[in-house]
Image: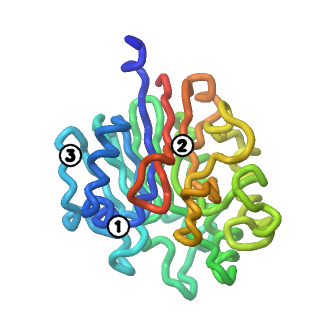
Amino acid sequence: AWWYDALMHIVSWNVNGIRAVHKKGLFVPMVEHLKPDILCLQETKAEQHQSEVDLPEYEEYWNSATGRKGYSGTAIFTKYKPQAVMLGFPEHIVKRYSLESDGYGDPNAEGRVIAAEYKDYFVVSVYTPNSKRDLSRLGLRHKHWDPAFLAFCKELEAKKPVIFCGDLNAAHTPYDLANPKENEGKHGYTKEEREGVDKMLDTGFVDTFRLFTQGKGHYSWWSHFANSRARNIGWRIDYIFASKRLASQVKAAEIHPQIMGSDHCPVSINIDV
């Protein structure tokens, strides 16, 4: 439709290694298929100079892990040059929420947050720390990371509306995973992790996908085991949230399970900004 081009198309994808997806020949086709205006990536597992992806239409901004190379990392590829780009949390938030090294390293050196400022809004790409199978990183996440990330977004929101997206490493409700009962209290579906998402909603951010689609069966991540993806035994842990005042401008929100290359699939919104 003629009006479609006026919408901003924002796509978020945990690529689980941009070099791996590109080697499979699946990264550029995703861009050609979804045609994002702004593409937020998580788990890039590379520095910019290591990426062989060449997309002349896009400016690229990277926040790569400095502590452990080839680990974690976020990026924003954008057709529109931002006014400013922020890598990680500002120092005062790191201090206020005591975001220090744990047994796994310094979460601030893992390239987990990147924010781009545009004229009318901010876009943030986030890769939330995984609480680990034995829940050894749940404390960091629940007491430090989630509150710090929310405070960061609220601080940005005091200036202009915020769209944040990425892998939050948590299924929010029983509708967001195929087997909620079996996973109750396990990593990715603990009370604490779900509470982190609750607080985002309580402070006025909107889960854009749920503006359009209710119920279960809509997932963005699948285990490599037992043919989970083909059977759609998955989890919805990749989200795009927006400030409440942007909610009426979101015209579509989708999950793209047909796009292969990672154990996650992309999620997207069309927004009239």
In this rendering, the answer to whether 195 lies above or below 182 is: above
Q: 143 or 33: which is nearer to us?
A: 33
Quarter assignment of residue 35: top left
Q: Residue at x 21, y 67 (%)?
A: 50
Label 1: few (<14), some (14–19) or many (≥20) C-alpha neighbours in 10 Å: many
Q: Residue furthest bottom?
A: 103
Q: Nearer the viewer, residue 155 or 140?
A: 140
Q: Which residue is mark 2?
A: 255
CA gap, disc 2 to disc 1? 26 Å
Q: Residue at 55% of width from left, 24% of height from top?
A: 251
- Quarter of the image for residue 73 reads bottom left
First reached walking from the N terminus: tag 3 or tag 1: 3
Q: In the current view of this chain or complex, which residue is farthest to the top?
A: 2
Question: Of residues 249 and 221, which is closer to you in this image?
Answer: 221
Kindly check if marks 3 and 1 are in contact, taking CB atoms under 8 A apart as contact: no
Tell me the kind of residue under disc 1: Ser
Q: Which residue is mark 3?
A: 55
The amino acid at mark 3 is: Leu
Q: Nearer the viewer, mark 2 or mark 1?
A: 2
Q: Mark 2 vs mark 1: which is more N-terminal?
A: 1
**Left or right of 155 in this view: 256:** left
| Residue at image location 43% in from the left, 73% down from the top | 109
Q: What's the residue type where badge 2 is placed?
A: Ile
Q: Secondary structure at mark 3?
A: loop
Q: Residues within 10 Å of mark 2 (few under 14, many from 20)?
A: many
Residue 273 place in picture, x, y as percent: 47, 24
Marks 3 and 1 sit apart, C-alpha to C-alpha, by: 19 Å
* SS of the residue under disc 1: loop
What element does badge 2 sit on?
A: strand
List x then y, in percent, for residue 37: 35, 35
Residue 64: mark: 1
- Between disc 3 and disc 1, the foreground one is 3
